[in-house]
Image (cartoon, grey):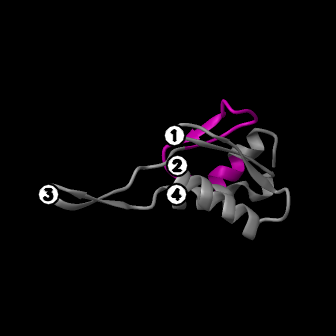
Amino acid sequence: VNVYGWRLSYDCIHRTLPPKAAWVCMNGHDSLKFMVKPAYAYELLVNAQRFMETEVVYDTPRGKQGMVIPVEASLGLSWAGGVEWKRTPSEAEFTQALRNLGGG
C-alpha cells in the first residue's frame, strides 16, 4: 500500500487535482481512505486502483513470478463505506452511487 498506493496517490492528488480537492485521510494495514470532493472522486478512484494494481515481480525458486493484487473500492459518507465494488465501476455506475449517497 505504501509504495504503490499512498505515495503515487498523494502525488496524483497534488499534481493533477485542484488544491484541497482530495487528501489521504487514513493509511491502514491494507487500505487507503480518501476524503475527496465528489467532482474528483472517480478520477482519484481510477488512478489509485491503477497504481495499487501494478504488477510486482518476485524472484522465486521457479524463476521470476509476477503478481497483481486486485483492489476493491467503496464509496460512503464515513470510513465504513456504503457501496462496494470488487472491480472498478464504470463512471456511470459510480456517478449513480454518488447521487444515491446525496453527493452528486
Residue numbers of the magenta segment: 73-96
Which percent across, then down, holds residue 3? 52, 56
Q: Residue at x 66, y 30 (%)?
A: 80
Residue underneath mark 4: 4
Given the current orientation, which residue lies at the most extreme left position? 62
Q: Residue at x 81, y 49 (%)?
A: 104
Mark 4: which amino acid?
Tyr
How far is disc 2 from disc 4 in space, using C-alphas? 6 Å
Given the current orientation, which residue lies at the most extreme right position? 19
The dot on residue 1 is 2
- Disc 2, disc 4: CB below 8 Å? yes
Mark 2: which amino acid?
Val
How far is disc 3 from disc 4 in space, using C-alphas? 25 Å
Q: Residue at x 85, y 56 (%)?
A: 20
Q: Earlier in the sequence, mark 4 or mark 1?
A: 4
Residue 82 seen in render: yes
Q: Earlier in the sequence, mark 3 or mark 2?
A: 2
- Disc 3, disc 1: CB below 8 Å? no
Q: Residue at x 39, y 61 (%)?
A: 55
Q: Is residue 15 above or below residue 31?
A: below
How far is disc 4 from disc 1 in space, using C-alphas? 12 Å
